[in-house]
């Protein structure tokens, strides 16, 4: 599975961005998909995940109510809608794919087998 993330950029605090992650590969739609982020000097952290079927979602507490993850299996694409952005959301955002049981997700980066190249999100205050 190959992943291509896009949609990052520079935005003012309070603004919005939508990240996209296009997956390719014969069974790309059968993976749980997640977004992680890593800020300079910090460890990679979980942001959100969606199951490959059933629409089950999981969010980090820091983004609940502001970010929404969704996927379009027909297009093999997962999205991360980010609203009410804060300066602390500044990071490189990575999408990842994990083989998971039906309808489940994971917050652990260890179970994600495939990773995109990352897209920079910068929120100015």
Image: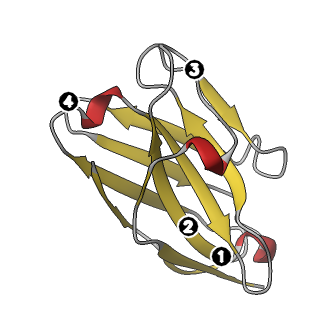
Crowding around mark 2 (Cα neighbors within 10 Å: few <14, some 14 to 19, many 20+) is: many
Judging depth in this view, the residue of 123 and 50 nearest the camera is 50
Mark before the other along the chain sequence, 2 or 4:
4
Residue marked by disc 1: 91
Ranked by sequence position, the earlier of labels 2 and 3 is 2
Pick the front one: 119 or 30: 30
Task: Please give the name of the residue rendered at 51% of the width and 63% of the height, measured from the top-left corner.
Answer: 94
Q: CA distance from mark 2 to mark 4?
A: 23 Å
- Which residue in the protein does label 4 denote? 74
N-terminal of the pair, mark 4 or mark 3, is 4
Q: Secondary structure at mark 3?
A: loop
Of marks 4 and 3, the one in the foreground: 3
Alpha carbons under labels 1 and 4: distance apart: 29 Å
Circle 1: element type: strand
Please tell me which residue is depicted at 44% across the width and 31% down the height of the picture: 99
State left or right for residue 45 relative to residue 95. Answer: right
Read off the residue under disc 2: 93
On residue 104, the disc is 3
Circle 3 crowding by C-alpha within 10 Å: few under 14, some 14–19, many from 20: some
């Amino acid at each position: 599975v190959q992943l291509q993330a896009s949609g990052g950029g520079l935005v003012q605090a309070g603004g919005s961005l939508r990240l996209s992650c296009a997956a390719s590969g014969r069974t790309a739609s059968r993976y749980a998909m997640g977004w992680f982020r890593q800020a300079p000097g910090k460890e990679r952290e979980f942001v959100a995940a969606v199951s490959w079927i059933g629409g089950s979602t999981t969010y980090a507490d820091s983004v609940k109510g502001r970010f929404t993850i969704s996927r379009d299996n027909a297009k093999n694409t997962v999205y991360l809608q980010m609203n009410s952005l804060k300066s602390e959301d500044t990071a490189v955002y990575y999408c990842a794919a994990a083989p998971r049981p039906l309808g489940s997700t994971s917050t652990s980066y260890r179970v994600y087998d495939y990773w995109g190249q990352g897209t920079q999100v910068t929120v100015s205050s």
